Amino acid sequence: MALVLTACVAGPAGASLPSAPAEATQTVPPRVPDADLRTLDRVEIPDLHTVTDGDNGSLVYAVIPQVSGYDLLNERIRAIAEEARGRSTGRQDGHRPPRGIVNVSWQALGSGEDIVGFLLSSLVGPAAGPTVGERSVWYDADAERLLTWRDLVTESAQEDVVAGMLAQLRHEVVFPDLERAESVLRTGDPVVGFSRSGGLVLGFDEDEVTAVAGAPRFEVPVSDGDLTPVGVRAREATLAPAPLAPAPTPPPPEPSPVDCRKESCVAITFDDGPAGRTTSRLLDILARAQAPATFFVLGTQAQAYPKVLSRIVADGHEIGNHSWSHPDLTRLDARAVRKQILRTERAIEKATGVTPTVLRPPYGARSKKVDAIARKLGYAEVLWSVDTRDWANHDPKKIVASAGKARRGAIILMHDIHPETVDAVPRVITKLRKKGFTLVTVSELLGTSQAGKRYYGTY
Ligand code: NI
């Protein structure tokens, strides 16, 4: 296997070039070579969403990718971001390091039908001189496992790759720690990906194998025969990306064992969405807390965010109908009311395959006429018993306080279109659970419900 010594080429062979001016050589700082690692400009991962962690008061900002349904992959990516945060707060030699930045960002390295690769880059440390950290995460969706570079290269070719990497380190880097490098290659998880020309690229973290600034990366050419079958797929995913297939749908969740006649149940509900960012963030929070909720969605929003809508169902929440465009239904004629409800129903069905059975009329405005139409269309009307007034106060403290006043059987009204409401939700959940309540969807709370009837809660 030939080596590519990227930094050694001085000019066309045989050309006699004048030597570079002395001052130019002096001003060039020592730099580690940094082989071209191909990242994808366009991400072909339909179920990808990102999670952002950070606030304006700190120098922490982390954006990481998550792919719905691929738990092992998502967990690994979250662990890498956590690790970067940990490095910023960890004590060394008993001293607290100076307040510094944590910045985590990502790029896709490859995407194929059953394989995906990401590069997570972190900057951690004092604002003036943070350290570059890089991790690659390759996931074989077929075998449901994470891959290191040793999974991509056949055992017989691995020796050549290690030798090639060490030779380049020795040539290209000032004072390389070859022993450390070899141990990282043989047992660690160095960054791995492919170059534009299909060469294998492996990289180390800053300060891992040399004191010179920068994270050294080298390319080693490999033939198809040097790669394992999954290695060939990873290279294809880099050079000719294709959309990653959605994760196999998990078996439908067991019917909830919660019996609200025995347990003390409350239902949290969110109206007027789905919105893009706030609803996605809310869904992350609910998933972490394993808290079910009910979303009364608008048809216009459902049409705009069908993916968020399908995630609501996939995550085990209930979807209710909140009309197409939020008019006061009592002021419309019967035909217009039916249209408001049915158009929304179709949008929900189209995005999720689920037909809603609960209707929340906008503003809680109902009349005999609206009741009759709801009955005919098969909807129970669900109002609320606790109004957090989140749409007026935009104050997480007030939202938590009023939600906390819920009694057993309460239906709590909130709106997933307001960021402050989403901010309040973790504390709302904690508070309700501390009071001994079990969170359920509206239909679980009601047990059985009747079309055309009105429900404010079960007390
Ligand atoms: Ni509303």
Image (cartoon, rainbow, N blue to C red):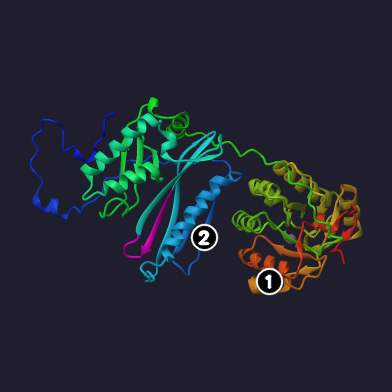
Look at the magenta stretch and give its main secondary structure: strand
Give SS at disc 1. helix
Q: For the residue marked with disc 1, what is the amino acid? A: Val
Q: Earlier in the sequence, mark 1 or mark 2?
A: 2
Looking at the image, which is closer to me, 32 or 360? 32
Q: Residue at x 44, y 29 (%)?
A: 228
Q: Relative to 451, is 105 on the left or the right?
A: left
Is residue 311 a member of the stretch shown in magenta? no
User: Residue 452 is drawn in which quadrant?
Assistant: bottom right
Number of residues whose C-alpha sits closer than 10 Å to that of mark 2, classed few (under 14), some (14–19) or many (20 or more): few
Residue 345, percent from left and from top:
77, 46
| Mark 1–mark 2 distance (CA, rounded to whole Å) | 22 Å
- In the picture of the structure, the residue carrying the numbered disc 1 is 400
| Magenta-tinted stretch | 120-130
Instruction: Find out if the beta carbon at label 2 lies less than 8 Å from the nearest ligand 1 atom.
Output: no
Q: Residue at x 80, y 50 (%)?
A: 341
Q: Quadrant of ligand 1?
A: bottom right
Q: For the residue marked with disc 2, what is the amino acid? A: Asp
- In the picture of the structure, the residue carrying the numbered disc 2 is 53
Q: Residue at x 9, y 38 (%)?
A: 17
Q: Is residue 67 above or below residue 56?
A: above
Give SS at disc 2. strand
Residue 28, percent from left and from top:
18, 52
Q: Relative to 453, is 242 on the left or the right?
A: left
Residue 86, percent from left and from top:
45, 61
Task: Pick the quarter of the image with the N terminus.
Answer: top left
Number of residues whose C-alpha sits closer than 10 Å to that of mark 1, classed few (under 14), some (14–19) or many (20 or more): many
Q: Relative to 105, is 456 on the left or the right?
A: right
Residue 72, percent from left and from top:
56, 46
